[in-house]
Image: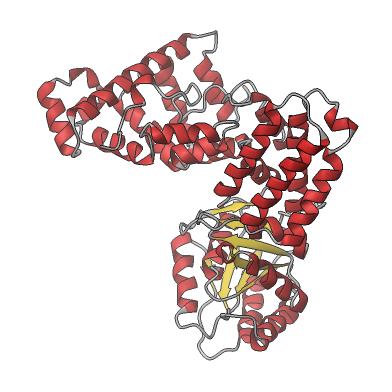
Amino acid sequence: MFESLSDRLSGVLDKLTKQGALSDADVSTALREVRVALLEADVSLPVARDFIKAVQEKATGQNVTKSVTPGQQVVKIVHDEMVHFLAGDDANAGQLKIDNAPAPILMVGLQGSGKTTTTAKLAKRLTERDKKRVLMASLDTNRPAAMEQLAILGTQIGVDTLPIVKGETPVQIAKRAKQQATLGGYDVYMLDTAGRLHIDQELIQQAADVRDVTKPRETLLVVDGLTGQDAVNVATEFDDKIGVSGVVLTRMDGDGRGGAALSMKAVTGKPIKFVGLGEKMDALEEFHPERIAGRILGMGDIVSLVEKAQETIEAEQAEKMMKRFVKGQFNMNDLKGQLEQMQKMGGMEGIMGMMPGMKKMAKQVEDAGFDDSVLKRQVALIQSMTKKERANPAILQASRKKRIARGAGMEVSDLNKLLKMHRQMADMMKKMGKMGKGGMMKQAMKGMLGKGGGLPGGMPADMDPKQLEAAAKKLGGKMPGGLPGLGGGGLQLPPGLSGFGKKK
């Protein structure tokens, strides 16, 4: 979503950091370019103007121009200001108020913004992460099969939905949901209201009636991130008429320009609580302003990367792998596990986008022909092998190689590259298993799974995200040593890999 804005801003701020001394004129010129970049990213004019003004006040004058690293000082000011514009002054804006059970959450928004899907995603998140008992109810009596859609999603994610009774009004359904949630001992009940193509009197009235009956703890407005500035107008309108406590921006994985996200809090005063990043039921993320600002400015987002790794790595499996690696055992099944791990964490691009200083390298890696389709092709090659061959790649002679390559629809040369990469990684694992008393690998794994030992790179496990972020910035472009699932030694592409999967 923020790609083009990120590229522009990184370019402008790079120029600043390369200069030794900065005059006020240099800062003004750079900020003019920043303003153009913001406007091109569809940030509303008043917000862009206020943003530049706030940065200019802090970035000109003695304290910056006379500081040791004036360029970096300006980058820091831009970063802090961006966090302020995205978050406002409330540090806990992203948390949902669901204290006294059953807590009602009202979902409102226009038609087609992804309300029903977001309701299900949020219900899944509350059930799995917060261990809440959730009941979902559809109040959409207009759209054909809207209620059935929520019921099907509920079955998919294992969350209860209110039984459908035809011919009831939205207010009657809301009352029944409240009653059922109270009697059934639910912690939260979510009300998915009807949408319209545009804001009209009937829509507002309906939502307001439901609000009066249920007195929701949270009223979340679901807005399509691709609608740009109009999303901000919709939020303002809904807030005036119904009262909104937070915003969920959907389709943030699309190619919209991200301006709505940057303007939303500044114009409406309402925090963005969650962002939808795709169709899958787990594609909903909390909106962390400081992390988003870091990503936009190319500073990476190590905290999210570590969280993602912790989510996708199963502790038991990692323990088993660790024991094998320490003994120097690393076969094709292990390599397949690591490649699939990378795919789960968002592929090469996803991982590199979160690493400090790696955003620029991502382009070079792509030019070298190493994109996410390469991971799929490597997994396909491993799947073409027999169990025996996977467990012991050393037995692969010419005839077996031909059969495997044919099975995956690829060339023997591709298989040879994969085998070379496996050998290099196996050697690396062996070395890491031996290094030091506890072995580097052991420490990294322990840290990753939160078993003392600290996070990779020697960061203590009880660090709060703020400290983690500070540590990430200090790292510059270096990745903490040893995220399991990334070949143990940080993300180093083995030398044999660069030519793998070049587009023919």
Residue sitting at x 62%, y 38%: 10
Residue sitting at x 76%, y 36%: 26
Quadrant location of residue 156? bottom left
Q: Position of residue 424 (x, y in %)?
A: 35, 17
In the picture, measured across the screen, residue 219 lies left or right of residue 228, that is right
Question: From this viewpoint, which residue is outermost toward the front?
Answer: 25
In the picture, measured across the screen, residue 81 lies left or right of residue 455, that is right
In the picture, measured across the screen, residue 114 lies left or right of residue 239, that is left
Camera-side residue of 224 and 148 = 224
Camera-side residue of 379 and 499 = 499
Quadrant location of residue 72? top right
Camera-side residue of 323 and 304 = 304
Question: From this viewpoint, which residue is outermost toward the bottom?
Answer: 167
Question: Where 461 sits versus 431, above or below?
Answer: below
Question: From this viewpoint, which residue is outermost toward the left?
Answer: 399
Question: Where 253 sits versus 138, above or below?
Answer: above
Q: Position of residue 442 (x, y in %)?
A: 52, 19
Q: Position of residue 65 (x, y in %)?
A: 84, 30
Residue sitting at x 65%, y 85%: 200
Q: Position of residue 406 (x, y in %)?
A: 14, 36
- The number of numbered badges drawn on the structure is 0
Question: Where 51 sits versus 214, above or below?
Answer: above
Residue sitting at x 52%, y 73%: 112
